[in-house]
Amino acid sequence: MLKRRTLISALSAASLLLATSAFAQFAERTIKFTNGVAEDHPVGLGVKKMQEVLAAKTGGRMKINAFWNNAAGGDLQATQALRAGTQEMVCTSSSPLVGIIKELGVFDLPFLFANEKEADAVLDGPAGAYFNKKLEDAGLVNLAYWENGFRNLTNNKRPVAKAEDFEGVKVRVMQNNIFLDTFKTLGTNAVPMNFGEVFTALETKTIDGQENPFVTIETSKFNEVQKYLSVTRHAYTPFLILYSKKLWDQLNPQEQAVLREAALEGQKVERTAIRAQSEKSLASLKTKGMQVNEITPAEQRRMFEKVKPVYEKNVPTIGAEPVNIVLEALKKARGG
Ligand code: KDG
């Protein structure tokens, strides 16, 4: 009996030792992850998947502590914290970062992508790698492109069914010169503003409207303070899953590899979830009382024609190289 007990305790000690040594290359660390959306946005599912992968692959030694609804400051502020090495991760739209990496402005050009398939082909291919290098040069490691999505206009003045209907609407846009240019060219009174301030600005009628994907509109409860939703699909915004390069360089190769794996697993979950949720959010926004109107293809073409000068005006600032890389990748994705 004694021998059996001794054998069992020896085996359990050995298995504990094995388990511990299997994760020995992972240091205990809690990663601060912030973003502007609510936890019930599909980004929340992507983060949950990342946490599951890290738990399994590091024995729970690497953990993500996520903060939602701009609780830790806006996208640009959080991104600057990454560059300073005072925060590990952020999920941010590319748009607020054009003051740091001007090349990212290509993704803000109006009506660039026609569908998610094109966006994935460009972002997950050599073009996406080109922007990842630019990000890394700026102290930011992009672990994966997730999806924010196609943006649509909400406002309290009128349904926007044709190009002229934008006239005079006070629309919040991201802090990005191309969005500002696009919405001024459409005739709106465009106001750049941090995402975290949008709900209150709509509620207090400081602004008439904003523009975001259906899922963001629903999970940020903009329907509570907005009457009209016009399906403009005027731009596609990617989410960047960024890690501070200062802190990244302190990780060993195994820790870096498991974070990249987790972010790519999270990408699959988030993209699948947001695409399944998008039409459900549109239906739900109608049920919750928003007056929804589609834009005819002819009217969308008129809007595109109206904002074409935005391309000519902003391409020199973005740079011909990044614009050509994306347009070539887009042409290839379209079978050109
Ligand atoms: O952190 C991500 C959010 O801030 C994101 O929703 C940004 O689309 C965005 C907006 O309109 O600012």
Image: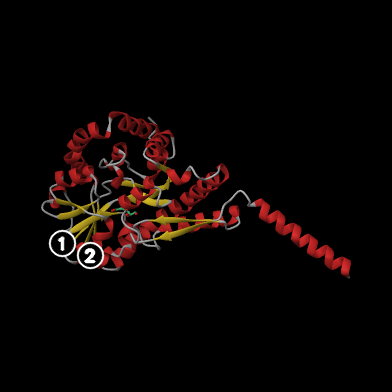
Ligand 1's quadrant? bottom left
For label 1, the residue is 206
Residue under the point 33% across and 48% down: 80
Is the N terminus in the top left, top right, bottom left or bottom right quadrant? bottom right
Camera-nearest residue between 177 and 284: 177
The picture quadrant where one finds residue 308 is top left
Can you say which quadrant of the picture contains the C terminus? top left
Q: CA distance from mark 1 to mark 2?
A: 8 Å
329 or 203: nearer the viewer: 203
Quarter-of-image position of residue 108:
top left
Would you say the residues marked 1 and 2 are in contact, meaning their CB atoms lie under 8 Å apart? yes
At x 31%, y 39%, the residue is 101
x, y percentage for residue 155? 19, 59
Q: Which mark is residue 200?
A: 2
**What residue occupies the far left of the structure in this picture?**
168
**Which residue is found at the position 14% from the left and 50% from the top?**
188
Q: Name the foreground residue: 206 vs 236.
A: 206
Q: Amino acid at mark 2?
A: Thr
Amino acid beneath label 1: Thr
Badge 2 marks a residue whose secondary structure is helix
Which one is nearer the viewer's eye here, 250 or 244? 250
